[in-house]
Image (spheres, rainbow, N blue to C red):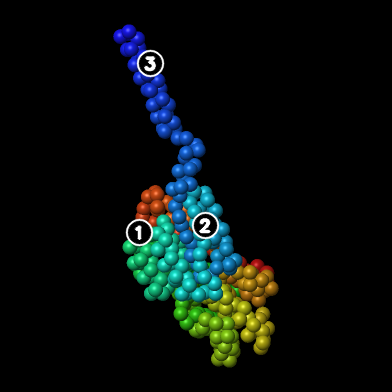
């Protein structure tokens, strides 16, 4: 009987060891069903915030961000405001921080309120911020990095195209908004960096305001004050059609060279019509994808630190048919 008892205990121990071994192997190799469930439940929660919802450019940024989030088993929501409403935009930032999302990807806004939210509230809550398309200075916002166009280089590109079209002699009007964002200042700096090397090129920087009516008025004043102006460059794409509208009331647009930035449906149409001579086209879908990939890499600790200078996406000059 004693031997039978010993054998029984041995058999039970052997069976137990087999079960333990089986589950150890399963844990080592990973159970496909349980792995998917874990990835789904532990995926990072991200938010993309813009102050220009439902525009072609930001729709593409959102598409790229969602594709990258799906690839990385993360969730992402696109928030924002309509009609450039800054207060609604800032409120979305506050809600994202209060919701304790894992990361915020946001269109940079060069205001004290935005920088305070990014530098203090987001940082204090341990939420990394990446700016996309529009940047703000890193030391004023503590954003982790920037993803988007090199706007300084974009300004240089449009200036070189202008020189190729016009030559090295003439008067050029640079139209800017009264409150410039960081990307607009960078574009203007790039333009001047090139044009200032040519003493026979005379540049005139004009504040065109923020509304269409102000742009029209500014253009009319330029045509009166500088009748022999050869070229117009606007650092804001939305202003191009207003400039052309005012010129067409008085003269043929063909008498002037007109340049802008961003390939919105409106500017693309004006380029095809030959009314805009060239624009700098950006890569919004690439911006969305890259910003999410970099955020995930930072959260996983795979890429530390992120480049403070930013990560630049592709830009290219699109010329009117008559200029090709």
Question: Of 259 and 59, which appears nearest the observer?
Answer: 59
Please name which of the two marks, 2 or 3, marks the residue nearer to the observer: 3
Question: Of 154 and 69, which appears nearest the observer?
Answer: 69
Up the image or down, 221 lies above or below 118; here it is below
**Where the C terminus falls, by quadrant?**
bottom right
Q: Residue at x 52, y 49 (%)?
A: 71
Labelled disc at residue 65: 2
Question: Of 130 and 161, which appears nearest the observer?
Answer: 130
Marks 1 and 3, Cα distance to the nearest angstrom? 54 Å
Marks 2 and 1, Cα distance to the nearest angstrom? 21 Å
Q: Residue at x 62, y 78 (%)?
A: 241
Q: Position of residue 172 (x, y in %)?
A: 54, 81
Q: Position of residue 157 (x, y in %)?
A: 53, 68
Which residue in the rendered view is the most extreme toward the front? 1
Labelled disc at residue 126: 1
Q: Position of residue 289 (x, y in %)?
A: 51, 56
Say few, some or many: other residues with alpha carbon within 10 Å of mark 3 (under 14 / 14 to 19 / 20 or more): few
Of pointers 2 and 1, the one earlier in the residue sequence: 2
Question: Of 296 and 290, which appears nearest the observer?
Answer: 296
Of pointers 1 and 3, the one earlier in the residue sequence: 3
Q: State the image quarter where residue 247 is shown.
A: bottom right
Up the image or down, 277 lies above or below 283; here it is below
Q: Residue at x 47, y 82 (%)?
A: 178
**In terms of secondary structure, where does tag 2 sit?**
helix
**In terms of secondary structure, where does tag 3 sit?**
helix
User: Could you tell whether 66 is left or right of 90 in the image?
Assistant: right
Q: State the image quarter where residue 141 is shown.
A: bottom left
Q: Which residue is mark 3?
A: 11
Q: Position of residue 187 (x, y in %)?
A: 48, 72
User: Could you tell whether 308 is left or right of 80 in the image?
Assistant: left
């Amino acid at each position: 009987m004693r031997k039978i008892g010993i054998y029984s205990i041995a058999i039970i121990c052997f069976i137990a060891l087999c079960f333990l071994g089986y589950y150890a192997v399963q844990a080592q190799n990973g159970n496909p069903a349980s792995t998917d469930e874990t990835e789904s439940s532990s995926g990072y929660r991200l938010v993309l915030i813009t102050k220009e919802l439902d525009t072609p450019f930001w729709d593409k940024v959102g598409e790229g961000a969602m594709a990258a989030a799906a690839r990385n088993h993360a969730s992402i929501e696109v928030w924002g405001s309509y009609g450039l409403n800054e207060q609604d935009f800032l409120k979305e930032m506050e809600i994202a921080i209060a919701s304790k999302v894992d990361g915020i990807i946001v269109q940079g806004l060069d205001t004290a309120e935005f920088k305070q939210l990014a530098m203090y509230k987001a940082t204090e809550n341990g939420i990394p911020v990446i700016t996309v398309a529009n940047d703000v200075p890193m030391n004023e916002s503590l954003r982790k990095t920037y993803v988007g166009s090199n706007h300084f280089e974009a300004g240089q590109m449009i200036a070189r195209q202008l020189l190729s079209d016009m030559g090295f002699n003439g008067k050029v009007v640079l139209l800017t908004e009264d409150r410039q964002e960081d990307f607009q200042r960078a574009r203007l700096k790039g333009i001047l960096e090139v044009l200032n090397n040519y003493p026979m090129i005379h540049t005139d920087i004009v504040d065109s305001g923020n509304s269409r009516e102000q742009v029209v008025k500014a253009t009319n004043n330029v045509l009166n004050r500088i009748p022999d102006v050869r070229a117009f460059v606007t650092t804001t794409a939305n202003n191009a059609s207003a400039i052309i509208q005012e010129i067409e009331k008085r003269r043929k647009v063909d008498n002037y060279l007109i340049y802008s930035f961003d390939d919105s449906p409106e500017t693309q149409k004006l380029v095809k019509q030959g009314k805009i001579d060239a624009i700098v086209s950006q890569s919004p879908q690439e911006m969305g994808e890259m910003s999410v990939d970099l955020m995930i890499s930072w959260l996983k600790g795979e890429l530390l630190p992120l480049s403070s200078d930013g990560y630049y996406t592709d830009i290219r000059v699109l010329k009117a048919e008559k200029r090709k």
